[in-house]
Amino acid sequence: MTSRRISLWGLLFLALISLHIAAAQETYTLKYRYEKGKVYRYADTMLVNSTQEMMGQEMKIASNVYSVSRAEVEDVKGDGGMILLMSAESMRISMKSPRGDTTLAPPELIGKRTRVTMKESGEVVRRETVDTVKTAGMMRGVSQRELFRMHTLSVKPVSIGEKWSGTRSDTSDAMGGKNVSTSTVEYTLAGKQKVGGRECLKITYAGKVAINGKGSMQGMDVFTEGTGTLGGTFFFDEKSGVMVADDGKFNNEMTAAITGAQNMTIPISQVGTMKHSLLTQ
């Protein structure tokens, strides 16, 4: 009787071990699957503290950007890729600096669309400005980029604890020229978590950024270069193929070299946070 009882306990123990191993080895297929004809709305908040030094004087600027954007799924291709029409429904920018406080709500950007063709993995293969809008100063180029960015998903099924990497390059207008930001990011499938009433996969990320740009200001050439880091956590609804939320931070160290009538180098530091959350679909 005793040996039989020990044998039963042994079998139960082995069964529990097998279940644990099976759960640990469960794999997940990560693909964006936004549905044709649907509209997905997101809220974005970005807080940035910038410090720059010019001619021996330090200037600190605090910025707060809040926007609500929409992505209308224009088409879903045979290979699973999607064509999205992205636009801003609302936007508010608040800035505090030694020169005073400023709040902007640029109406020229509201409703202006950008068409983005994206793979299931989140890689953007084409970006097209549908509604051209002329902006100046700090708003230049905003309408030429998608209002929210998708993280890169693993092209292979992954299990809890597994990693993958992604590289992306973003180009924007700046002072009559172009700024190119290239990010190399490592992702880790960290677990599961319920967010906004959805069962989501929790994915952490960390990476490095390289920044290069060229523009002009008051007849002088401006060359920008720098490096940075980024990191955070985003939540992905695997069943629906939808990003639900993203909570990230970044840190950039740059220099702007000005040549022309005056020559100077301006060091710029940026520290910020970003929040991205699904509102409706």
Image (cartoon, grey):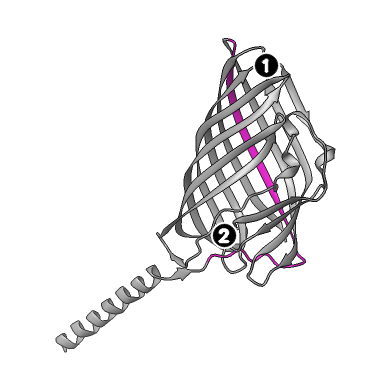
Amino acid under disc 1:
Pro
The answer to which of marks 1 and 2 sits earlier in the sequence is: 1
In the rendered image, residue 129, in percent from the top left (x then y), is placed at 77, 48
> Furthest-top residue in view?
56
* Towards the viewer: 58 or 76: 76
- The residue wearing badge 1 is 98
Residue at 28%, 80% in the rendered image: 12
**Magenta residue check for 182:** no
Quadrant where the N terminus is found in the figure:
bottom left
According to the picture, the residue beneath numbered tag 2 turns out to be 236
Q: Which mark is residue 124?
A: none
Left/right of residue 226 with respect to residue 66 in the rendered view: left
Bounds of the magenta segment: 30-55
Callout 2 amino acid: Phe
**In the image, is residue 58 above or below residue 15?**
above
Residue 139: x and y in percent read 75, 34
Q: Residues within 10 Å of mark 1 (few under 14, many from 20)?
A: few
